[in-house]
Image (cartoon, grey):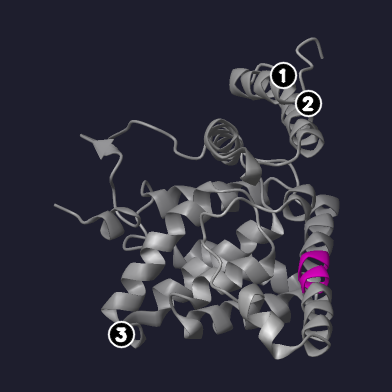
Amino acid sequence: MASVHESLYFNPMMTNGVVHANVFGIKDWVTPYKMALMVLIEELSQAGTHLSLLERRRLNRLLLPLLQGPDMMLSRLIKAVEECCPQIASSVHIRIKLMASGELKDMEEFFDELSEAFSGTEPEVHKTSVVGLFLRHMILAYNKLSFSQVYKLYTALQQYFQSDEKKNRQEETEMELTHCEELDGKMEKEEFDEPLREEEISCNGPLSQKQAEYFLSQQAYLLKNDETKVLSPASLQKELNNLLKFNPDFSEAHYLSYLNSLRVKDVFS
C-alpha cells in the first residue's frame, strides 16, 4: 500500500481505472504562484539522491497544502520550502528570477519542457495523482491561452517577482534601522497554517474552486473559534463579493457573508 507521500505522485483516487474525484475543482487557471509550484515540483523530481529521505518527506507533506491553498507571495513560499530543504528553495528562487528577468520565450520553453518531462510511457508523476492532476490542469490551461494572454501571464510573473523583491528590500532596510533585541520577536518561526495577512489576500487574483473552498473553510473556522485571527469585516466581505462575482451560486460564500454580517450586527446587508 502506498504511503501518504507516495500517493501525491501515484494513484490515490483511482479504482479499476475510474477517477472518482477532481481535487482541484472544475476551473483552474495559471498564475505566477502556480508557476512557482510547478518549478518546485520539477526541482523535486530532478533532485534524485541529492535529497535526504527526511527532506523529501517534509517537501511531500508541504506540497498538498501548497497546491490546495490560496496563492501566496513568493517570499512566503520560499520560506516554507526553505524550512524543509534550503537547497531546493534556493533553486526555485533562482529559476523564477531567471525566468522573470529573461524573455517571454523562457516561459514558453519552461512549459514545453514540463510537458515533455511529465508525459510519455514512464512519467515522473502519475497522471491521476494529486500532483499529476495539478500539472495536467496547468499545462492544459496554458495551452488554451491566446498570445496576448500568454504575454499578460509573463508580465504578471515579472510583477510577482519584482514586487516581492521590493518588499524584501524594504524589510531589510527596516531591520537595519531596528535594534537587534527588537528583532527577536519579529523573526520567530512563522507557522505555515497561519491565516494569510490582509495585504497578501488583496494582491491575489481570482481563486480556483479548491482554493476558494479552502479560504472559506479557514475563515469560517476562525470566525467561530478565534475571531482575532480572521480578516476584518470589510476585507472579508470584499473577498466574498469577489468570489460571488465569479460564482453567484457559491452557497458557502453566502453563508460566510451572513456570519460576517452578524459580526457587525448588520443582518440585512
Q: Nearer the viewer, mark 1 or mark 3?
A: 1
Q: In the rendered image, which quarter is residue 122 located in?
A: bottom left
Total numbered circles? 3
- The 10 Å Cα crowd at callout 1, few under 14, some 14 to 19, many 20 or more, is few
Residue 102 visible in rendering: no
- What amino acid type is highlighted by mark number 3? Thr
Location of mark 3 (residue): 49
- CB under 8 Å between discs 2 and 1: yes
Q: Please report whichever mark, 1 or 3, sits nearer to the chain's N-terminal start.
A: 3
Q: Secondary structure at mark 1?
A: loop
- What amino acid type is highlighted by mark number 2? Lys
- What amino acid type is highlighted by mark number 1? Pro
Image point 83% across, 85% down: which residue? Answer: 173
User: Gap in Å between the C-alphas at discs 1 and 3?
Assistant: 48 Å
Disc on res. 245:
2
Q: Nearer the viewer, mark 3 or mark 2?
A: 2
Residue nearest the viewer, comparing 157 with 104: 157
- Report the magenta residues as a range: 159-164
- The 10 Å Cα crowd at callout 2, few under 14, some 14 to 19, many 20 or more, is few
Location of mark 1 (residue): 248
